[in-house]
Image (spheres, coloured by chain):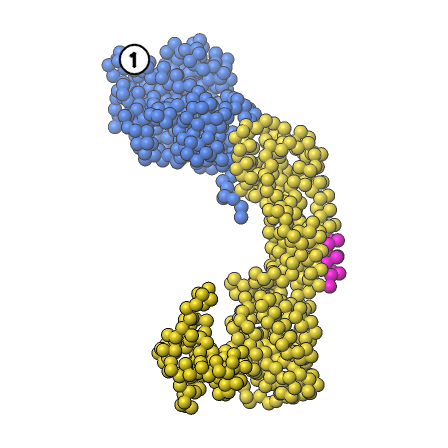
């Protein structure tokens, strides 16, 4: 068994070194790496040549253009990168063949044996230089404490080329700038069992580098060297999260929420699990992934990274179908809401994660109840949509039960005159506000920011359009139906502003 | 059944003989064709073409052919009785009468010589030969493959000098006959490979004269070029026809292999349809055809040239830059594709060809 050669740039080996007396008759423009030097005394020996080799034809063999033609063909078949023969003149057809095959063609004035020795020596020296660079880079990467630091080291070694850690198409960490006409080098990191490939189409995070073509071989090896460190750092973060979340035990133990989303009320309450002092305002946050299969495992690096950026000191605990955390409400609650919304907007929606939150401003609620509320809110929240607060549960729940399109259908049947009115949206908003405020005209006027006379006028208008609030048994259904309407979809009064 | 060849048969035979042997000069073949046609007209009939099976199995036959060394017989024209002398000498050495002649190679001038000699001597022309095409060496025969003796060999030179060589091994016979040809004046008319009709039937390429006539009938017909190719494909199993234009001719492409009588050269053509680069390696004949660096045909395959406009037979002298030709390859007789057959004819090319390959590595 032989060790895999690392490979050096063919340009570095053949073009930059003129010690071998080489004359280039065709040099492909694309970057190619060289792993081996093969001296051939019989043409069929090329069949044993490995890929990325430079083939040298012995002088007694390469005495005819046709031998060179056949050797070029063999070299192409074996994916060799270059053919070197002794000094001779070629017809244009031979050079054209080299061009068609993308195989570099050189002659040497130094003698084939001598050239082979020179190139072998140069290849070894260049490989040693590359290994030395890689070793130094590896040492620096091992000392790095974070993934951005690792990527920064690689980027600097590649001349500030763009290096990224990408998870499911989302760039988690990025460093450097994309060069002109780059070559993309990609390395898939498998965080789990290396022998387990997972489901088709699924893969772990990718290390991606956009580099100049000449750096492709080195970038390939640099990423390979970085893979262990990056993988270790990702797993370390995951472990830190687990350790931080350990006091919370499992979501299931706390809340009785089974993985299928059903509640298990037979679970006994365990108040001792609450780590925060009683009376501490707290909010339970649940990040739920829509499809429960292996998706949460794959997007874990993104979710935990984004969470860590948003709440550096709050541990995030893992659940098969998502994550949860208990966030102390040291800040005003609306700041928490803003932070959660930013978190939801930072790409989690694209990954299918929905965010639900339940507040306990007095620190008196049972943790179990709080988490169950947050879990229920997360189940109702839409991935990519707003963070759903359990306190504002009603309308989203109603919208789940009665989607706006269906509500419009129903309203067109029940209240055709209202829906046909050009001022329908403001009348409906007024009625809903009036009912929200338990029939208080003053509160509704304050909520809508209009004069109470305006509210009364609109209520009378509503009555003429068929919306009567005189029958208590119809109040709830009227309230639900009008609340479920999407007012933006209603006809508007024909006015210059409305037409905008 | 034996039949007497007429003038048209001889014309077709000449065309077929030139087609299967793409040499530098077809003039010698045409010269012998014309001599034979004149003789037919004089005698009022052509030679008898006898299938091998129609002869007494014990009947002794011999191959007839020119062996040259450095001089084309068109440059020192035979008097006309050289082969009659050689046959008489061979009969004398064998002590039995010869009852048929066959060409040393059913291709090129030697195919025509056999017809002429059959007509001159009155012996039947046996419908077989020991090559099925042409190879450069006397030793490269299917009879040699079968372990039969090449000798005794009777030779007559251009000045009338004669020799009879008692030799068994065909390879040795090649060296001695080639050396004698040089000494005799550049070429020698030979009668060699004395074999019985049974031996010829068992180990020769049977029916090769008839096949040449059939090739000639197709090529000499008024059919369109493509129609001729269709007929030839059916007859010969043509593997490839490439229409290409000559772009380069090289005088010396590789070192001459010791023991071979000619100088090597190469021609490069560009495929008219797809732009493929076609390279022909030539030594006496076309040894190898390389298309985009891949060997498409190599001896014992027959590689020949035809003019696209009328499918008339072209020669190596048609390989001038700018000329457009159709390159045709088809397999030789089956005996040449056995391990022993390849070993006998391939060394001149196989030391550089290598084994069959399986396409590009993944």
Give the residue drawn at x 27%, y 25%.
B222
Q: Nearer the viewer, residue B250 or B237?
A: B250
Query: Magenta region: which residues?
Result: A135-145
Mark 1, chain letter? B
Q: Is residue B67 left or right of residue A269?
A: left
Q: Could you tell me residue B254's position as x and y percent?
A: 55, 26
Q: Could you tell me residue A361's position as x and y percent?
A: 64, 84
Q: Is residue A373 left or right of residue B162?
A: right
Give the structural element (helix, strand or loop) at label 1: helix
Q: Nearer the viewer, residue B209 or B100?
A: B209
Prevalent SS, magenta region? helix
Chain seen in yellow: A
The reply to whether residue A305 is in sight is yes
Q: Nearer the viewer, residue B8 or A232?
A: A232
Give the residue drawn at x 58%, y 70%.
A344
Q: Could you tell me residue B318's position as x and y percent?
A: 42, 22
């Amino acid at each position: 068994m032989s060790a895999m050669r690392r490979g050096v740039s063919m340009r570095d080996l053949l073009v930059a070194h003129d010690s071998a007396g080489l004359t280039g008759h065709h040099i492909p423009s694309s970057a190619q790496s060289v792993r081996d030097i093969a001296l051939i005394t019989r043409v069929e020996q090329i069949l044993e040549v490995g890929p990325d080799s430079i083939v040298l034809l012995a002088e007694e063999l390469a005495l005819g253009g046709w031998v060179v033609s056949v050797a070029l063909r063999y070299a192409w078949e074996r994916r060799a990168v270059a053919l070197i023969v002794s000094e001779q003149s070629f017809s244009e057809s031979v050079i054209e063949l080299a061009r068609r095959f993308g195989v570099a063609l050189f002659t040497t004035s130094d003698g084939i044996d001598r050239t082979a020795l020179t190139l072998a020596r140069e290849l070894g020296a260049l490989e040693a230089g590359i290994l030395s660079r890689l070793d130094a880079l590896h040492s620096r990467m091992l000392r790095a404490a974070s993934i951005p630091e690792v990527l920064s080291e690689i980027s600097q070694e590649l001349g500030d080329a763009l290096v990224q850690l990408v998870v499911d198409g989302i760039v988690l960490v990025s460093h450097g700038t994309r060069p002109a006409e780059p070559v993309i080098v990609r390395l898939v990191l498998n965080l789990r069992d290396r022998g387990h490939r997972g489901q088709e189409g699924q893969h772990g995070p990718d290390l991606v580098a956009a580099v100049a073509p000449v750096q492709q071989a080195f970038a390939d090896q640099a990423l390979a060297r970085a893979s262990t460190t990056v993988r270790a750092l990702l797993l370390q973060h995951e472990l830190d999260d687990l350790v931080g979340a350990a006091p919370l035990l499992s979501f299931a133990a706390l809340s009785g929420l089974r993985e299928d989303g059903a509640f298990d009320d037979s679970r006994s309450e365990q108040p001792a699990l609450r780590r925060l002092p009683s009376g501490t305002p707290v909010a339970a946050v649940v990040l739920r992934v829509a499809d429960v299969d292996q998706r949460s495992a794959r997007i874990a690096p993104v979710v935990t990274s984004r969470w860590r950026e948003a709440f550096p000191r709050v541990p995030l605990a893992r659940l098969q179908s998502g994550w949860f955390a208990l966030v102390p409400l040291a800040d005003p609650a609306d700041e928490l809401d803003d932070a959660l919304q930013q978190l939801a907007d930072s790409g989690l929606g694209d990954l299918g994660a929905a965010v639900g939150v339940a507040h306990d401003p007095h620190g008196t609620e049972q943790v179990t109840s709080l988490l169950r509320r947050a879990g229920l809110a997360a189940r109702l929240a839409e991935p990519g949509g707003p963070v759903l607060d359990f306190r504002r549960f009603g309308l989203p729940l109603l919208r789940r039960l009665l989607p706006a399109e269906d509500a419009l259908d129903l309203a067109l049947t029940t209240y055709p005159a209202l829906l046909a009115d050009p001022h329908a949206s403001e009348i409906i908003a007024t009625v809903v506000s009036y009912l929200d405020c338990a029939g208080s005209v003053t509160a509704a006027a304050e909520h809508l920011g209009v004069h109470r006379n305006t509210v009364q006028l609109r209520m009378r208008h509503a009555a003429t359009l068929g919306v009567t609030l005189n029958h208590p048994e119809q109040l709830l259904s009227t309230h639900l139906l009008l609340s479920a309407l999407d007012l933006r979809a209603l006809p508007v009064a024909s006015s210059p502003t409305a037409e905008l | 059944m034996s039949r007497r060849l007429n003038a048209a048969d001889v014309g077709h035979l000449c065309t077929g003989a030139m087609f299967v042997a793409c040499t530098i000069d077809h003039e010698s073949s045409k010269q012998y064709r014309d001599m034979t046609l004149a003789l037919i007209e004089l005698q009022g009939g052509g030679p008898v073409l006898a299938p091998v099976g129609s002869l007494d199995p014990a009947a002794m036959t011999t191959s007839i052919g020119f062996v040259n060394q450095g001089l084309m017989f068109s440059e020192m024209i035979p008097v006309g009785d050289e082969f009659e002398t050689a046959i008489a000498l061979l009969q004398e050495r064998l002590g039995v009468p010869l009852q048929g002649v066959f060409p040393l190679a059913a291709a090129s001038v030697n195919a025509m010589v056999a017809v002429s000699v059959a007509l001159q001597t009155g012996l039947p022309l046996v419908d077989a030969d020991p090559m099925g095409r042409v190879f450069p060496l006397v030793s490269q025969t299917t009879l040699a493959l079968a372990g039969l003796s090449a000798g005794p060999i009777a030779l007559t030179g251009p000045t009338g000098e004669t020799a009879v060589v008692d030799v068994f091994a065909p390879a040795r016979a090649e060296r001695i006959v080639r050396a004698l040809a040089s000494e005799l004046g550049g070429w020698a008319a030979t009668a060699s490979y004395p074999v019985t009709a049974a031996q010829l039937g068992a180990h020769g390429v049977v029916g090769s004269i008839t096949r040449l006539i059939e090739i000639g009938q197709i090529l000499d017909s008024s059919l369109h070029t493509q129609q001729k190719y269709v007929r030839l494909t059916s007859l010969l199993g043509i593997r490839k026809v490439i229409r290409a234009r000559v772009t380069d001719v090289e005088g010396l492409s590789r070192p001459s292999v010791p023991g071979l009588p000619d100088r090597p050269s190469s021609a490069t053509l560009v495929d008219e349809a797809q732009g493929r680069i076609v390279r022909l390696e030539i030594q006496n004949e076309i040894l190898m055809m390389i298309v985009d660096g891949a060997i498409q045909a190599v001896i014992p395959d027959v590689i020949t040239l035809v003019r696209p406009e009328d499918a008339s037979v072209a020669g190596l002298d048609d390989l001038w830059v700018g000329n457009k030709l159709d390159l045709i390859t088809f397999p030789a007789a089956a005996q040449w594709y056995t391990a022993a057959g390849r070993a006998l004819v391939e060394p001149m090319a196989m030391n550089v060809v290598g084994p069959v390959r399986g396409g590009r590595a993944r």
